[in-house]
Image: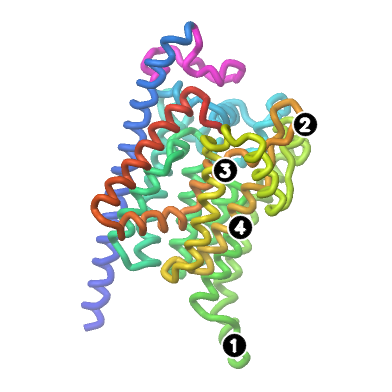
């Protein structure tokens, strides 16, 4: 009887992973191919009216290999925008003072691009595309499994991966940046924690932090998941509780190592401190989250026409609204997930940008891109799509699809910001 139960559990797990991998790999490949084709068409139509402007015009001053053939230009040139150029430059040329602004980006993404480039034939752009597609496949598959474990709902798992691929700025998952890699390791951490594999969870959390510094918040996520599993420390039997908790909690100490490794590496190259880079090269400064919201509101009041069509402003206030909904919906009100979205969003908005080269205060830049990492909010949106009527789902999907097509076209033309 016991063997039969184990066999059924193993079969369910295998079935779950099989579905997760089919959805993850299939959607990630379709996402890559269709977006690249669409963005190449957009540039082909609009670029024809721009005279001799290069398709990779953002990399004109970067020390990157030239895209020589029309195929390379169409497939890879459309992705060379904004921070993608910095990540590719770091992968090719390393961290250095003559490109100090790029040295604020953590190690894992450029290192992975560089390693893939050494192992694969072709250009650095091809290596980055392969890495990003694999990472996004992993993120989608892990999201599927995490949702299954948290909600015991396969239909919600399917809708969650679809919703993530259709997020209005999901094209950043295919661009040579850190979003796919970081989210894959965040979800790997959550999956391992839910499966009570804390040593592996600690390693995954460390890699998440090595991809983006806010991975350190996974320490708190892990602590809350442990409390959810074992409860708060009891007044009695504290020793037994400690013997259960401590061997697991100790692995959370690995997570901040990712940030320490990055800082130590920068120090070994005698690079300026991060705050100096942000102020002198990135034209940005940091405030507390409440002041950040007020600064964004003042910018909206002063620039209502720009704010109305600005993805970062929409992302900021939609995220706040979704967090409120999450808190009031018992199914989604998991302390670890609420903590994850609140501290990440709060951290993301604290960086305020000046208008480039001036002291004119602007707003929290790149919030739309960073909000992609708030996967519990994506699950909440997916739950809404799953639970509504057939026509509600059709309208919802069409709105998301139209948004991602419009904003990815804007990315090609450098109208959708970094």
Count residues near mark 4 (Cα–Cα under 10 Å), then give few for <14, some for 14-19, many for 20+. Answer: some
Q: Is residue 88 above or below residue 370?
A: above
Alpha-carbon span between mark 4 and mark 1: 28 Å
Q: Which of marks 4 and 3 is in front?
A: 3
Place residue 379 in its image quadrant.
bottom left
Location of the N terminus (image quadrant): bottom left
**Which residue carries the number 4 mark?**
343
* Sequence-wise first label, 3 or 2: 2
Residue 270 seen in render: no
Q: Name the residue under label 1.
A: 234
Secondary structure category for the residue under label 2: loop
Element at label 1: loop
Residues packed near mark 3 inside 10 Å, few (<14), some (14 to 19) or many (20 plus)? many
Circle 2 residue: 359
Query: Answer yes or no: do the residues labelled 4 and 1 have beta carbons within 8 Å?
Result: no
Q: Of marks 4 and 3, which one's residue comes earlier in the chain?
A: 4
Instruction: Select label 1 or label 2 by which is in front.
Output: 2
Q: Where is residue 169 in the image (x, y as percent from the top left)?
A: 46, 39
Highlighted range, magenta = 52-74
Asked whether 365 falls inside the magenta stretch, the response is no
Judged by its main secondary structure, the magenta piece is loop
Q: Name the residue under label 3.
A: 367
Residue 371, image x, y percentages: 52, 47
CB of mark 3 within 8 Å of CB of mark 1? no
Q: Residue 284 carries which label?
A: none
The residues tagged by marks 4 and 2 sit, at their Cα atoms, a distance apart of: 28 Å
Write the residue at 54% across / 75% down: 227
Please give left or right for residue 68 compared with residue 212 in the image. left
Q: Position of residue 256 (x, y in %)?
A: 64, 56
């Amino acid at each position: 009887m016991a063997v039969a139960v184990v066999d059924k559990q193993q079969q369910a797990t295998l079935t779950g992973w099989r579905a997760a991998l089919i959805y993850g790999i299939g959607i990630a490949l379709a996402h890559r191919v269709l977006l690249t084709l669409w963005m190449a068409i957009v540039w082909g139509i609009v670029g024809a009216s721009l005279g001799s402007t290069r398709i990779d015009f953002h990399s004109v001053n970067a020390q990157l290999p030239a895209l020589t053939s029309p195929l390379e230009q169409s497939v890879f040139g459309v992705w060379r925008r904004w921070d993608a150029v910095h990540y590719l430059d770091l992968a090719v040329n390393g961290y250095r003072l003559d490109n100090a602004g790029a040295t604020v980006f953590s190690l894992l993404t450029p290192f992975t691009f560089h390693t893939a480039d050494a192992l694969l034939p072709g250009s650095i752009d091809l290596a980055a595309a392969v890495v990003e597609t694999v990472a996004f496949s992993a993120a989608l598959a892990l999201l599927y499994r995490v949702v299954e474990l948290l909600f015991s709902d396969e239909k919600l798992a399917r809708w969650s991966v679809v919703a993530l691929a259709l997020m209005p700025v999901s094209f950043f998952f295919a661009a040579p940046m850190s979003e796919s890699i970081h989210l894959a390791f965040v979800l790997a951490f959550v999956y391992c924690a839910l499966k009570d594999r804390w040593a592996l969870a600690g390693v995954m959390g460390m890699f998440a932090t090595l991809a983006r510094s806010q991975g350190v918040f996974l320490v708190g996520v892990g602590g809350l998941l442990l409390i959810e599993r074992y409860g708060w420390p009891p007044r009695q039997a504290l020793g037994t509780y400690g013997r259960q908790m401590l061997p697991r909690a100790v692995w959370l100490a690995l997570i901040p190592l990712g940030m320490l490794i990055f800082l130590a590496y920068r120090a070994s190259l005698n690079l300026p401190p991060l705050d100096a880079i942000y102020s002198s090269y990135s034209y940005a400064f940091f405030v507390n989250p409440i002041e950040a919201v007020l600064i964004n509101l003042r910018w909206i009041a002063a620039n209502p026409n720009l704010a109305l069509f600005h993805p970062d402003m929409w992302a900021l206030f939609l995220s706040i609204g979704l967090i409120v909904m999450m808190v009031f919906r018992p199914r989604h009100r998991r302390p670890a997930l609420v903590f994850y979205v609140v501290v990440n969003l709060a951290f993301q908005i604290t960086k305020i940008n000046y208008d480039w080269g001036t002291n004119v205060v602007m707003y929290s830049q790149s919030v739309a891109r960073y909000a992609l990492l708030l996967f519990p909010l994506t699950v909440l949106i997916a739950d809404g799509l799953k639970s509504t009527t057939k026509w509600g789902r059709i309208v919802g999907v069409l709105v998301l699809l139209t948004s991602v097509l419009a904003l990815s076209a804007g990315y090609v033309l450098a109208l959708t910001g970094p």
